[in-house]
Amino acid sequence: MSAQKVIVVGAGICGLSSAIWLRRAGHDVMLIDKDGPGAGASYGNAGLLAEWGIVPISGPGIAWTGLKYLTSRNAPLSVQWGQLPRIAPWLAQFLRNASDTRTREISAALSHLLHDSVDQHRALARGTRAERWIASSDFGWAYASRAAFDADAYTWELRRDAGLIPEVIEGEAVREVEPMLGPATNCLVRLRGHGHVTNPGAYMADLAQVLQDEGGTYRRAEMRDVTMVDGRITQVITDHGPLPCDTAVLAAGIWSEQLARKLGIRVPLVAERGFHLEFKDPSQMPRMPLMMTSGKFAVNPMSQGLRCAGMVELGGTSPKVSRRPIELLRRNVASVFPDLKYGEVEEWMGYRPSTPDSLPMIGQMGASGVYAAFGHQHIGLTGGPKTGRWIAGMIGGGSNAELAAFGANRFT
Protein backbone atom coordinates (compact mmCIF):
# COMPACT_ATOMS: atom_id res chain seq x y z
CA MET A 1 0.00 0.00 0.00
CA SER A 2 1.28 3.50 -0.82
CA ALA A 3 2.30 5.99 1.84
CA GLN A 4 -0.58 7.66 3.66
CA LYS A 5 -1.05 10.84 5.64
CA VAL A 6 -1.80 9.66 9.18
CA ILE A 7 -2.86 11.66 12.23
CA VAL A 8 -2.21 9.91 15.54
CA VAL A 9 -4.27 11.28 18.43
CA GLY A 10 -2.66 10.78 21.82
CA ALA A 11 1.03 10.89 22.79
CA GLY A 12 1.07 8.14 25.40
CA ILE A 13 3.05 4.97 24.79
CA CYS A 14 0.47 3.51 22.36
CA GLY A 15 0.28 6.69 20.28
CA LEU A 16 4.03 7.25 20.31
CA SER A 17 4.71 3.65 19.31
CA SER A 18 2.10 3.76 16.53
CA ALA A 19 3.51 7.02 15.19
CA ILE A 20 7.12 5.81 15.21
CA TRP A 21 6.36 2.49 13.52
CA LEU A 22 4.12 4.20 10.96
CA ARG A 23 6.89 6.68 10.17
CA ARG A 24 9.40 3.84 9.81
CA ALA A 25 6.99 2.25 7.34
CA GLY A 26 7.21 5.38 5.21
CA HIS A 27 3.98 7.18 6.10
CA ASP A 28 3.55 10.92 6.60
CA VAL A 29 2.81 11.01 10.33
CA MET A 30 1.62 13.77 12.64
CA LEU A 31 1.17 13.03 16.35
CA ILE A 32 -1.08 15.34 18.36
CA ASP A 33 -1.86 15.53 22.07
CA LYS A 34 -3.69 18.11 24.14
CA ASP A 35 -1.27 17.91 27.08
CA GLY A 36 2.11 16.67 25.87
CA PRO A 37 3.99 13.34 25.57
CA GLY A 38 3.16 10.86 28.31
CA ALA A 39 1.09 13.33 30.30
CA GLY A 40 -1.43 10.74 31.54
CA ALA A 41 -1.20 7.09 32.55
CA SER A 42 1.94 6.68 30.44
CA TYR A 43 3.69 9.01 32.91
CA GLY A 44 2.28 7.78 36.20
CA ASN A 45 2.37 4.00 35.70
CA ALA A 46 4.52 1.62 37.73
CA GLY A 47 7.14 1.44 34.96
CA LEU A 48 6.94 -2.35 34.70
CA LEU A 49 7.38 -4.28 31.47
CA ALA A 50 4.93 -6.86 32.71
CA GLU A 51 5.28 -9.82 30.35
CA TRP A 52 3.71 -11.73 33.24
CA GLY A 53 0.62 -9.45 33.24
CA ILE A 54 -1.52 -12.02 31.47
CA VAL A 55 -4.03 -12.66 34.27
CA PRO A 56 -7.18 -10.57 33.74
CA ILE A 57 -8.67 -8.72 36.68
CA SER A 58 -11.89 -10.58 36.06
CA GLY A 59 -11.75 -14.26 36.86
CA PRO A 60 -13.56 -16.97 38.79
CA GLY A 61 -14.66 -15.64 42.17
CA ILE A 62 -14.15 -11.96 41.32
CA ALA A 63 -17.73 -11.07 42.29
CA TRP A 64 -17.22 -12.37 45.83
CA THR A 65 -13.71 -10.91 46.11
CA GLY A 66 -14.92 -7.54 44.84
CA LEU A 67 -17.78 -7.49 47.35
CA LYS A 68 -15.35 -8.17 50.20
CA TYR A 69 -13.07 -5.39 48.97
CA LEU A 70 -15.91 -2.90 48.71
CA THR A 71 -16.93 -3.52 52.30
CA SER A 72 -13.39 -2.95 53.62
CA ARG A 73 -11.65 0.37 54.09
CA ASN A 74 -8.27 -1.35 53.74
CA ALA A 75 -8.87 -2.95 50.33
CA PRO A 76 -7.07 -1.94 47.11
CA LEU A 77 -10.42 -1.56 45.29
CA SER A 78 -12.99 1.19 45.81
CA VAL A 79 -15.84 2.76 43.85
CA GLN A 80 -17.00 6.33 43.47
CA TRP A 81 -20.59 5.54 44.34
CA GLY A 82 -21.96 8.55 42.50
CA GLN A 83 -20.59 7.01 39.28
CA LEU A 84 -22.25 3.63 39.87
CA PRO A 85 -25.31 4.18 37.59
CA ARG A 86 -23.00 5.09 34.71
CA ILE A 87 -20.58 2.18 35.16
CA ALA A 88 -23.19 -0.49 36.05
CA PRO A 89 -23.55 -1.76 32.43
CA TRP A 90 -19.75 -2.04 32.23
CA LEU A 91 -19.66 -4.00 35.49
CA ALA A 92 -22.30 -6.39 34.17
CA GLN A 93 -20.20 -7.11 31.09
CA PHE A 94 -17.10 -7.41 33.28
CA LEU A 95 -18.73 -10.10 35.41
CA ARG A 96 -19.82 -12.04 32.32
CA ASN A 97 -16.12 -12.46 31.50
CA ALA A 98 -15.36 -14.05 34.87
CA SER A 99 -15.86 -17.73 33.97
CA ASP A 100 -12.89 -20.10 33.88
CA THR A 101 -13.27 -20.65 30.13
CA ARG A 102 -13.43 -16.96 29.34
CA THR A 103 -10.56 -16.15 31.72
CA ARG A 104 -8.30 -18.65 29.94
CA GLU A 105 -9.23 -17.20 26.53
CA ILE A 106 -8.46 -13.68 27.69
CA SER A 107 -5.19 -14.80 29.29
CA ALA A 108 -4.08 -16.47 26.04
CA ALA A 109 -4.81 -13.28 24.10
CA LEU A 110 -2.89 -11.17 26.62
CA SER A 111 0.06 -13.55 26.37
CA HIS A 112 0.07 -13.03 22.59
CA LEU A 113 0.36 -9.28 23.15
CA LEU A 114 2.79 -9.24 26.08
CA HIS A 115 5.13 -12.24 25.88
CA ASP A 116 7.97 -10.35 24.15
CA SER A 117 7.42 -6.89 25.64
CA VAL A 118 11.04 -6.19 26.60
CA ASP A 119 12.20 -7.09 23.09
CA GLN A 120 9.47 -4.89 21.60
CA HIS A 121 10.57 -1.90 23.68
CA ARG A 122 14.19 -2.45 22.72
CA ALA A 123 13.24 -2.66 19.04
CA LEU A 124 11.30 0.59 19.32
CA ALA A 125 14.11 2.46 21.07
CA ARG A 126 17.26 0.75 19.76
CA GLY A 127 19.96 3.21 18.75
CA THR A 128 17.96 6.23 19.93
CA ARG A 129 18.05 8.59 22.89
CA ALA A 130 15.11 6.68 24.45
CA GLU A 131 17.00 3.41 24.81
CA ARG A 132 18.70 4.51 28.04
CA TRP A 133 15.45 4.25 30.03
CA ILE A 134 14.93 0.49 29.45
CA ALA A 135 16.50 -1.75 32.09
CA SER A 136 16.75 -5.53 32.38
CA SER A 137 15.67 -7.00 35.71
CA ASP A 138 14.08 -9.90 37.49
CA PHE A 139 10.64 -9.45 39.01
CA GLY A 140 9.35 -10.56 42.40
CA TRP A 141 6.02 -11.08 44.15
CA ALA A 142 6.17 -10.51 47.91
CA TYR A 143 3.76 -12.69 49.92
CA ALA A 144 3.14 -12.71 53.66
CA SER A 145 3.55 -16.50 53.74
CA ARG A 146 3.79 -19.65 51.65
CA ALA A 147 0.09 -20.17 52.35
CA ALA A 148 -0.69 -16.82 50.74
CA PHE A 149 1.26 -17.86 47.66
CA ASP A 150 -0.53 -21.23 47.56
CA ALA A 151 -3.88 -19.40 47.75
CA ASP A 152 -2.86 -17.63 44.52
CA ALA A 153 -2.55 -20.97 42.70
CA TYR A 154 -5.03 -20.13 39.92
CA THR A 155 -3.11 -17.10 38.68
CA TRP A 156 0.15 -19.03 38.78
CA GLU A 157 -1.42 -21.86 36.80
CA LEU A 158 -2.24 -19.35 34.07
CA ARG A 159 1.31 -17.99 34.14
CA ARG A 160 2.80 -21.49 34.04
CA ASP A 161 0.62 -22.25 31.01
CA ALA A 162 2.29 -19.24 29.36
CA GLY A 163 5.75 -20.60 30.18
CA LEU A 164 6.40 -18.43 33.25
CA ILE A 165 7.89 -20.71 35.92
CA PRO A 166 8.24 -19.20 39.43
CA GLU A 167 11.16 -19.61 41.79
CA VAL A 168 9.86 -19.73 45.38
CA ILE A 169 12.03 -18.35 48.22
CA GLU A 170 10.95 -18.67 51.85
CA GLY A 171 11.87 -17.56 55.36
CA GLU A 172 15.04 -15.57 56.04
CA ALA A 173 16.28 -16.37 52.54
CA VAL A 174 13.77 -13.73 51.40
CA ARG A 175 15.89 -10.97 52.94
CA GLU A 176 19.09 -12.45 51.53
CA VAL A 177 17.60 -12.00 48.06
CA GLU A 178 15.80 -8.71 48.77
CA PRO A 179 17.15 -7.01 51.93
CA MET A 180 14.62 -4.15 51.76
CA LEU A 181 11.70 -6.42 52.60
CA GLY A 182 10.62 -6.32 56.23
CA PRO A 183 9.30 -9.16 58.44
CA ALA A 184 5.81 -8.86 56.91
CA THR A 185 7.15 -10.75 53.87
CA ASN A 186 8.05 -14.41 54.36
CA CYS A 187 7.66 -15.72 50.82
CA LEU A 188 9.19 -14.21 47.67
CA VAL A 189 8.40 -15.53 44.21
CA ARG A 190 10.84 -14.55 41.47
CA LEU A 191 10.69 -14.60 37.68
CA ARG A 192 14.00 -14.20 35.90
CA GLY A 193 14.75 -12.17 32.80
CA HIS A 194 12.22 -9.34 32.65
CA GLY A 195 12.57 -5.55 32.51
CA HIS A 196 11.36 -2.15 33.59
CA VAL A 197 11.47 1.52 32.62
CA THR A 198 13.49 3.72 34.94
CA ASN A 199 11.72 7.02 34.16
CA PRO A 200 8.44 6.72 32.22
CA GLY A 201 7.98 10.47 31.79
CA ALA A 202 11.46 10.99 30.36
CA TYR A 203 11.03 7.89 28.17
CA MET A 204 7.86 9.32 26.62
CA ALA A 205 9.50 12.71 26.03
CA ASP A 206 12.46 11.04 24.33
CA LEU A 207 10.20 8.87 22.15
CA ALA A 208 8.41 12.03 20.97
CA GLN A 209 11.79 13.42 19.97
CA VAL A 210 12.69 10.13 18.26
CA LEU A 211 9.59 10.52 16.09
CA GLN A 212 10.69 14.00 15.07
CA ASP A 213 14.31 12.91 14.54
CA GLU A 214 13.01 10.26 12.12
CA GLY A 215 10.90 12.72 10.10
CA GLY A 216 7.54 12.65 11.86
CA THR A 217 5.76 15.70 13.27
CA TYR A 218 4.55 16.36 16.79
CA ARG A 219 2.05 19.12 17.57
CA ARG A 220 0.40 20.20 20.80
CA ALA A 221 -3.28 20.25 19.82
CA GLU A 222 -6.63 18.93 21.04
CA MET A 223 -8.92 16.90 18.80
CA ARG A 224 -12.37 18.47 18.76
CA ASP A 225 -14.14 16.66 15.91
CA VAL A 226 -13.64 14.85 12.62
CA THR A 227 -14.75 15.30 9.04
CA MET A 228 -16.16 12.18 7.39
CA VAL A 229 -16.82 11.77 3.67
CA ASP A 230 -18.77 8.68 2.59
CA GLY A 231 -18.20 7.21 6.04
CA ARG A 232 -14.42 7.64 6.02
CA ILE A 233 -12.28 10.18 7.85
CA THR A 234 -10.74 13.02 5.84
CA GLN A 235 -9.87 15.52 8.57
CA VAL A 236 -9.18 15.73 12.27
CA ILE A 237 -10.58 19.01 13.58
CA THR A 238 -8.43 20.49 16.38
CA ASP A 239 -8.40 23.61 18.50
CA HIS A 240 -5.76 24.89 16.06
CA GLY A 241 -7.75 24.13 12.93
CA PRO A 242 -8.37 21.15 10.61
CA LEU A 243 -5.68 18.57 9.83
CA PRO A 244 -6.30 16.63 6.59
CA CYS A 245 -5.54 12.91 6.65
CA ASP A 246 -6.07 9.62 4.87
CA THR A 247 -6.14 7.64 8.11
CA ALA A 248 -6.15 8.35 11.85
CA VAL A 249 -5.14 6.43 14.97
CA LEU A 250 -7.08 7.00 18.18
CA ALA A 251 -4.71 6.38 21.10
CA ALA A 252 -5.96 8.89 23.66
CA GLY A 253 -6.38 6.53 26.63
CA ILE A 254 -9.52 7.13 28.67
CA TRP A 255 -10.36 10.15 26.49
CA SER A 256 -10.72 7.83 23.49
CA GLU A 257 -14.27 6.98 24.58
CA GLN A 258 -15.61 10.49 24.08
CA LEU A 259 -13.56 10.98 20.90
CA ALA A 260 -14.94 7.74 19.45
CA ARG A 261 -18.42 9.22 19.82
CA LYS A 262 -17.41 11.78 17.18
CA LEU A 263 -17.37 8.80 14.80
CA GLY A 264 -20.77 7.63 16.01
CA ILE A 265 -19.12 4.72 17.83
CA ARG A 266 -19.70 3.89 21.48
CA VAL A 267 -17.07 1.88 23.32
CA PRO A 268 -17.45 0.48 26.86
CA LEU A 269 -14.51 2.22 28.50
CA VAL A 270 -14.34 3.00 32.22
CA ALA A 271 -11.69 4.93 34.14
CA GLU A 272 -9.81 2.85 36.68
CA ARG A 273 -8.28 5.61 38.74
CA GLY A 274 -4.76 4.60 39.75
CA PHE A 275 -2.30 6.21 42.16
CA HIS A 276 1.38 6.42 42.87
CA LEU A 277 3.69 7.68 45.57
CA GLU A 278 7.22 8.49 44.49
CA PHE A 279 9.68 8.74 47.37
CA LYS A 280 12.57 11.10 46.65
CA ASP A 281 16.06 10.38 48.07
CA PRO A 282 15.02 7.00 49.54
CA SER A 283 17.30 5.36 52.07
CA GLN A 284 16.66 1.97 50.45
CA MET A 285 16.01 0.65 46.96
CA PRO A 286 14.94 -2.88 46.03
CA ARG A 287 17.27 -4.95 43.89
CA MET A 288 14.42 -5.69 41.50
CA PRO A 289 10.89 -4.40 40.89
CA LEU A 290 8.31 -6.03 43.15
CA MET A 291 4.59 -6.65 43.47
CA MET A 292 3.43 -6.39 47.07
CA THR A 293 0.54 -8.83 47.03
CA SER A 294 -0.97 -7.89 50.39
CA GLY A 295 -1.65 -4.29 49.30
CA LYS A 296 -1.74 -4.94 45.53
CA PHE A 297 0.83 -2.31 44.64
CA ALA A 298 4.00 -2.38 42.56
CA VAL A 299 7.42 -1.10 43.61
CA ASN A 300 9.97 0.11 41.08
CA PRO A 301 13.44 1.60 41.67
CA MET A 302 13.57 4.56 39.27
CA SER A 303 16.17 7.16 38.38
CA GLN A 304 14.25 9.89 40.21
CA GLY A 305 13.20 7.90 43.30
CA LEU A 306 11.27 4.88 44.53
CA ARG A 307 7.84 4.61 42.92
CA CYS A 308 5.03 2.66 44.59
CA ALA A 309 1.99 2.44 42.34
CA GLY A 310 -1.35 0.69 42.46
CA MET A 311 -4.90 0.79 43.79
CA VAL A 312 -8.08 0.71 41.72
CA GLU A 313 -10.87 3.23 42.14
CA LEU A 314 -13.71 2.78 39.66
CA GLY A 315 -15.15 6.14 38.79
CA GLY A 316 -15.01 9.11 36.51
CA THR A 317 -12.37 11.48 35.22
CA SER A 318 -12.73 14.25 37.77
CA PRO A 319 -9.30 15.77 38.52
CA LYS A 320 -10.06 15.72 42.26
CA VAL A 321 -7.67 13.34 43.97
CA SER A 322 -9.26 10.79 46.31
CA ARG A 323 -7.42 10.79 49.61
CA ARG A 324 -8.44 7.34 50.88
CA PRO A 325 -6.45 5.33 48.28
CA ILE A 326 -3.44 7.63 48.72
CA GLU A 327 -3.44 7.24 52.50
CA LEU A 328 -3.97 3.48 52.27
CA LEU A 329 -1.00 3.24 49.89
CA ARG A 330 1.11 5.20 52.39
CA ARG A 331 0.17 2.80 55.20
CA ASN A 332 0.88 -0.25 53.07
CA VAL A 333 4.31 1.05 52.07
CA ALA A 334 5.18 1.70 55.73
CA SER A 335 4.06 -1.82 56.64
CA VAL A 336 6.23 -3.68 54.12
CA PHE A 337 9.24 -1.32 54.22
CA PRO A 338 9.47 -0.38 57.93
CA ASP A 339 13.03 1.00 57.67
CA LEU A 340 12.45 3.23 54.63
CA LYS A 341 13.44 6.89 55.05
CA TYR A 342 13.00 9.53 52.36
CA GLY A 343 12.73 13.21 51.52
CA GLU A 344 9.67 14.60 49.79
CA VAL A 345 6.91 12.46 48.26
CA GLU A 346 5.21 12.98 44.89
CA GLU A 347 1.52 12.01 44.85
CA TRP A 348 -0.11 11.22 41.51
CA MET A 349 -3.50 10.08 40.26
CA GLY A 350 -4.41 9.05 36.73
CA TYR A 351 -6.91 7.09 34.69
CA ARG A 352 -6.39 3.59 33.33
CA PRO A 353 -8.66 3.07 30.28
CA SER A 354 -10.36 -0.27 30.95
CA THR A 355 -12.61 -2.48 28.85
CA PRO A 356 -14.95 -5.04 30.44
CA ASP A 357 -12.97 -7.97 29.02
CA SER A 358 -9.50 -6.70 30.08
CA LEU A 359 -8.36 -6.60 26.43
CA PRO A 360 -7.36 -3.44 24.57
CA MET A 361 -9.09 -2.29 21.41
CA ILE A 362 -6.74 -2.59 18.45
CA GLY A 363 -7.80 -2.21 14.83
CA GLN A 364 -10.02 -0.27 12.43
CA MET A 365 -13.30 1.00 13.84
CA GLY A 366 -15.85 -0.06 11.24
CA ALA A 367 -14.71 1.14 7.80
CA SER A 368 -13.98 4.65 9.07
CA GLY A 369 -10.25 4.76 8.41
CA VAL A 370 -9.79 5.36 12.15
CA TYR A 371 -7.79 2.74 14.04
CA ALA A 372 -8.21 2.12 17.75
CA ALA A 373 -5.12 1.72 19.94
CA PHE A 374 -6.51 2.18 23.45
CA GLY A 375 -8.10 0.39 26.41
CA HIS A 376 -4.97 -1.30 27.78
CA GLN A 377 -5.97 -0.93 31.49
CA HIS A 378 -2.93 -2.05 33.53
CA ILE A 379 -0.71 -3.11 30.62
CA GLY A 380 -0.43 0.00 28.44
CA LEU A 381 3.30 0.51 28.95
CA THR A 382 3.95 -3.20 28.51
CA GLY A 383 1.87 -3.66 25.37
CA GLY A 384 2.27 -0.24 23.76
CA PRO A 385 5.19 -0.91 21.38
CA LYS A 386 3.65 -4.10 19.99
CA THR A 387 0.27 -2.39 19.66
CA GLY A 388 1.96 0.32 17.60
CA ARG A 389 3.69 -2.23 15.40
CA TRP A 390 0.40 -4.06 14.82
CA ILE A 391 -1.36 -0.79 13.96
CA ALA A 392 1.36 0.12 11.45
CA GLY A 393 0.99 -3.30 9.87
CA MET A 394 -2.78 -2.98 9.58
CA ILE A 395 -2.60 0.48 8.01
CA GLY A 396 -0.01 -0.88 5.60
CA GLY A 397 -2.54 -3.47 4.44
CA GLY A 398 -1.50 -6.43 6.57
CA SER A 399 -3.91 -9.09 7.76
CA ASN A 400 -5.10 -8.96 11.36
CA ALA A 401 -7.08 -12.18 11.52
CA GLU A 402 -5.08 -13.47 14.51
CA LEU A 403 -5.92 -10.28 16.42
CA ALA A 404 -9.67 -10.85 16.50
CA ALA A 405 -9.69 -10.96 20.31
CA PHE A 406 -8.63 -7.29 20.31
CA GLY A 407 -10.98 -6.21 17.52
CA ALA A 408 -12.18 -2.64 17.79
CA ASN A 409 -15.74 -3.60 16.79
CA ARG A 410 -16.27 -6.50 19.16
CA PHE A 411 -18.64 -4.53 21.41
CA THR A 412 -20.68 -3.06 18.56
Image (cartoon, grey):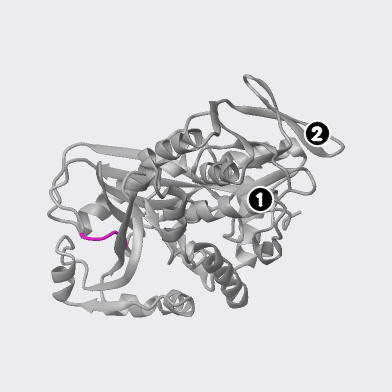
What percent of the width, then of the height, locates residue 139? 31, 65
Pointers 1 and 2 in contact (CB under 8 A)? no
Mark 1 closeness class: few <14, some 14–19, many ≥20 residues within 10 Å? some
| Left/right of residue 282 with respect to residue 294 in the rendered view | left
| Looking at the image, residue 323 lies above or below residue 105 | above
Does 103 appear above or below 209?
below
Whether residue 289 appears in magenta in the rendering, the answer is yes
The kind of residue tagged 1 is Pro
Question: From the viewer's perspective, is 35 left or right of 347?
Answer: right
Residue at the spot 56% in from the left edge and 45% down from the top edge: 24
Q: Choose mark 1 or mark 2, whichever is in front.
A: 2
Q: How many marks?
A: 2
Residue type marked 2: Met
Which residue is drawn at the image coordinates 31% and 59% (left, top)? Answer: 136
Classed neighbour count for the residue bearing mark 2: other residues with Cα under 10 Å, few (<14), some (14–19), many (≥20)? some
**Percent position of residue 405, x then y:** 66, 64
In percent of width and height, residue 268 lies at: 66, 50
Q: Is residue 358 left or right of residue 178?
A: right
Q: Answer whether residue 278 is magenta in the image.
A: no
Q: Would residue 290 be seen by someone viewing this image from the given angle?
A: no
407 or 187, which lies in front?
407
In the picture of the structure, the residue carrying the numbered disc 2 is 228
- Upstream in sequence: badge 1 or badge 2: 2
User: Considering the numbered disc 1 on the image, is that residue within a helix, a strand or a loop?
Assistant: loop
Q: Is residue 246 above or below residue 126?
A: above
Q: Which residues are magenta?
A: 287-291
Disc 1 target residue:
268
Q: Main secondary structure of the magenta part?
A: loop
Q: Residue at x 49, y 33 (%)?
A: 212
Q: Alpha carbon of mark 1 to alpha carbon of mark 2: how far?
A: 23 Å
Residue 274 image point, x, y percent: 43, 47
Camera-side residue: 184 or 24?
24
